[in-house]
Image (cartoon, grey):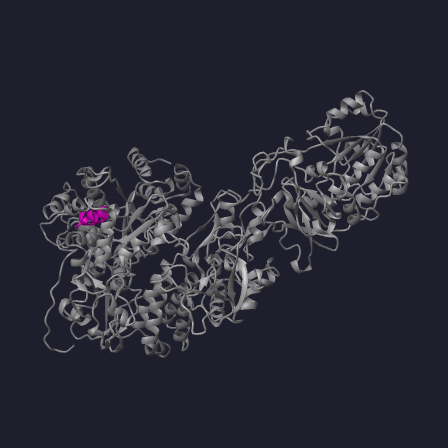
Amino acid sequence: MSAQKRKVVKERRLILKHADDPKYSNGISSYLKVGGYEMLKKSLKLKPEEIGEEVLKSGVRGRGGAGFPAGMKWKFLDRKSGKPIYLICNADESEPGTFKDRQILHKDPHQLIEGMMISAYAIQAKQAFIYIRAEFFEGAKILERAIEEARAKGFCGDKVLGSEFSCDIVVHRGAGAYICGEETGLIESLEGKRPNPRIKPPYFPAVLGLYQCPTIVNNVETLCNVRHIMEMGGDEFSKIGKPNNTGTRIWCVSGHVVKPGYYEFECGALTMGELIYDVCGGLLPGRSLQAVIPGGSSAKVLRADERFKGTLKDGSDFDWGIEDIPLDFDGPMAAGSMSGSGGVIVMDDTADIVEAMANVNAFYAHESCGQCTPCREGVLWMRKITKRMCAGDARQDDADLLLSVANQIEGRTICAFGEAAAWPTQSFVSKFREDFVKKAKNPKKKKGSLQLI
Amino acid sequence: MNLSEETLGKIDEVIPRYPEKRSAALMVIHLVQEELGSISLETCEWIADKLDLQPINIQELVTFYPMLREKPWGKKHIRVCRTLPCALRGSYGTCKTLEEKLGVKEGHVSDDGEFSIEFMECLADCGEGPVVMVGEDTYENIEGDRASNFADLLVKGKLESSKEFTSYEAALVSDAPAKSKKGKTE
Amino acid sequence: MISKAKEKLITINLDGKEVEVPAGMNLIDAAALHGKEIPHYCYHPQLTVAGNCRMCLIEMGTPMRDRATGDPVLNEDGSPKIGWVPKPVIGCATNASPGMHVKTASDVVKGCREGIMEFLLLNHPLDCPICDQAGECRLQEFATDYGRGYSRYTERKNVKPKRTRLGPRVMLDDERCILCSRCIRFSQEVANDDVLGFVDRGSFSTLTCFPGKELANNYSLNTVDICPVGALTSTDFRFKMRVWFLKETKSICCESSAGANTIVSSREGEIYRITPRRNDQVNDSWMTDSGRSLYKSVKSDDRILHPQIDGADDSLENALNTSSGLLRDKKVAVVGSCRSTLEELFLLKRLSTLLKAKNFLRGHFGDDDGILQSADRTPNLRGALVSGFEKEYPSDNLKKLNSALKKKQFEAVLVVGEDLIASGIDAENLMGVDLIHLATHSNQTSYLAKVVIPLLSHFEKTGTYVNRGFYAQSFEQAVPGPAGLIPDIQILTKLISLIDPDCSISSNPAELWETMSKVRNSVLKGISFSDVRKSSIHLDGSNWKNLPFVEKKALHFEPLELSSD
């Protein structure tokens, strides 16, 4: 890292504005004091489609990982079917490296509830659910409590704030399965079935979702944003961040940095280098950067000494080092990876890349639902190969084999889990080929690396 | 099968929350497991009956979801995150320390039924890894010497009262009536 | 079932060729119409689409349209520009739409199939030499047709339960299971018996029944049929015979009036199994387990193998001559059987007309399962109506005949198949009456009969049944009958010519059908034997709509008064 002095970019806390205020509780009193539920009151006076218009104008993209514009998602909703409409909040936060929703759920649940009630009104949902991962034991209780408080004040339930609109929120706990983060897997789980993701077509949630009814599934952070969009208006909101990358993003940094944690910035306000070195205090003494996974473990790994070149959507050419990558949706994408759910996993030079790969493969092999062939068989195979490599039996052609297996998974599965599992292997092996080849000659773990598998 | 009135009441309260009975399956299983510690075959049949389902429909869930159990864990169940962010901060070592001090291997229950350890996939607290859950409470940065102390306190049954370790949950600011959030087991 | 073939035809481009397919038909079926195989495991035309095996991945594109104007985007040569979906899609869940382009043999598609085949075989035991599925195994076939021919897998294979008894008739080898979920979907969607499921997850997912429960419903063996691999096997059939030795004969299940289409598999005159044959109007691809075991009666001990006169074996010629002597110019009652074929009942009716005899018929009834075991437990009650043998709906006994016999109204009774005693006839009323029994198996009636003439079993002859939905369905002889026996229709034509030497009626089915179709007002009008051999033919049953048919609403069957047409 160059010693050159940088302008330190300040956090802009929109979603996490109050979360870490020691006087701010997760009860309704704190929320009401900071203007809570005023946006719900305002929204109920509007026509539902006007809210949808604001969300569309805001350009807000889904915060769950895929980055699909939320307003567009709502547009796809089949409103003519006559069937009840459902809203589901995806609070199954489980992409490795991501821990932003945890903060919202535990520390500012009413913000989510308000966002959900506005959204529910906008899509005219009959019933809303929060699907929360089961490891958030306290989180589920906090939400239950918060919903009760909101219900008592008329913010949710029957005839919200005396209007004709009724919608209640049910907290539904998962039971430890990553695949429930996939929206159709989540829906199956919520229906009381094994969470096997559905084939699309025909089962697009906006048309054939929960109980085969039109359903919108949005991430926690996305739904919170709706509240803020209503506060400032879609146009104003779209001025935060950059075009096509609007609003703030909560970057969750983990791994080998001095100050890991969650940091909220305007989209594109800083670069990867600024995040790692300025915000997170840089690397541990004496270490150098080896690799960064920019958007949760499913995102393709970026190598510290890589150059990223190409042309941006606006036509301008770029030539970035890893530190130059702008942190928004499009930056990591341009660098061949993705910002995903915002989980930035940093690896310094001590990390044994093959072991890290084995760790990631073990995760996906454990989490594959097993429904479709390529993922079920391919991901376990990759785990077995990398585990064997780390157990002293690496072979010369393992790298090629891993790549080939990953290529046989990508694009051929029912859901995006196939890509999520294939991309790490594709990127690790192609970018750190020498590490994989070296394993065959010298099976020992890299000096200084902690055990990763 | 004997379930307390309280659990039965909660079950009857949770089922009508859903437009379709089957949707309540996971929540009912959670409630039953909280009391019984695990879901036996007989329990599967009871739950299936309660929800107008076939027992296989429940067994399919119990065996799919890692947090649903066919056999109970120990009185204190320790979950150690092993996924990459925590591993990069030393969670494999943490697990080893816990295994040694608690006298039980990962994936097993100690002979006296007191402790059990389980490697978990990402617990979504990666910024404070390695993350260890004791029962329902999340402890952060459990690594190296801290992991050693942590394990010692656990063995002595003094983790709850220790000043050194406060769980994520206990540190939250809440309006709810003060109650001990510590040391609960499943 | 996501796609339902509609009548409207549209044009799609299949591997560069413009072809017509029904709009909305899924691409597996659409390609099959034009002789292109899109290999698949989990897809089954009569089950919901699961899309899990991924074997049917193909490349697909649709004509591009201008977003603003909605106009088609054209290539320079004026042809529509095709927007290819960037990822391969599954044929089973992709429905044909006008102008759609499909590639079923591109390099991408080949690569997909090679990959899927390799994955499917990773944890498969590759135990074909000892596997019963060998010869009719999709894994074997597609590995040969679409696989790479070698494996790169050197890791340990997963271990799963082998030789699990799923139920009284079905065995499971979980290591061979490819988790296609066909059996689970069948149990839920067709058999209405949700007993199967997957436990555990990922590659360790395992098909099972809940402990203490069994796959015991009367449709359990259909799971064996639709299992594309050797995971589910039939307890009855396994290890008995290699399938490539089996001769397959088209047949119809004679268990009930449902008339499931079947295949009888035999070798050297011995039947080894009966399996369903697809007929989308009648039984889809299913049949009952109970219907599959009916062949066992072919070799049973009570089989009548020789003609008898007064209890002693005799020649067929003598038996026929004696019979005609007993029947000629007598007051005769003829008892027909709803288990006879349409052709036989027609001839029996001819015979009884010549004899000026009175006809009697009884039914055999049971519970209706609403699927393919109907309340009418005979295959051809409607055949008795269509042939003109009977006009009334039969009851489950012959009490009317009994009272007539009591009043000494008959001197001779010709009985086909039925047991008079078990049909409510008092033995004393048969005193002094000459009984002629034509049957496959002996019963109390054959012991009382003066003449007994052996008939061929269902599996040993050719004929036609009319099922509950008035579908005339023909079946073929699967195995030869016992030595020296001749087909029932020849026995009947011989009897006819003995009674009236002037009456010439052929026992040749084609000629017989010609005769049947010429009967005035017959619903068989215009139908030839070759027509009915080709496929099931729906007859007009409205003549009989007022009869009290016992069948309930079931798979592809609406009781007449309920049906819309």
**Mark count:** 0
Specify start and end residues of the magenta stretch as a single range: A108-118
Q: What x and y, as percent, mark residue C388?
A: 74, 36
Residue drawn at point x = 84 percent, y = 47 percent: C484
Q: What x and y, as percent, mark residue A315?
A: 25, 74
Q: What x and y, as percent, mark residue A383?
A: 38, 66
Identify whether A121 is placed above or below C408: below
Identify whether A79 is placed above or below A329: above
Can you tell which quarter of the image residue C465 is in?
top right
Can you tell which quarter of the image residue C414 is in?
top right
Magenta stretch, main secondary structure, is helix
The N terminus of chain B lies in quadrant: top left
Residue C324 visible at all: yes
Q: Which residue is nearer to you in this view: A91 or C235? A: A91
Q: Which residue is nearer to you in this view: C341 or A182? A: C341
Residue A306 visible at all: no
Identify whether C83 is placed above or below A24: below
Residue A391 among magenta residues: no
Q: Which residue is nearer to you in this view: A31 or A366? A: A31
Residue drawn at point x = 56 percent, y = 39 percent: C554
Residue lying farthest to the top in this orientation: C407
- Asked if residue C31 lies left or right of residue A309, the reply is right
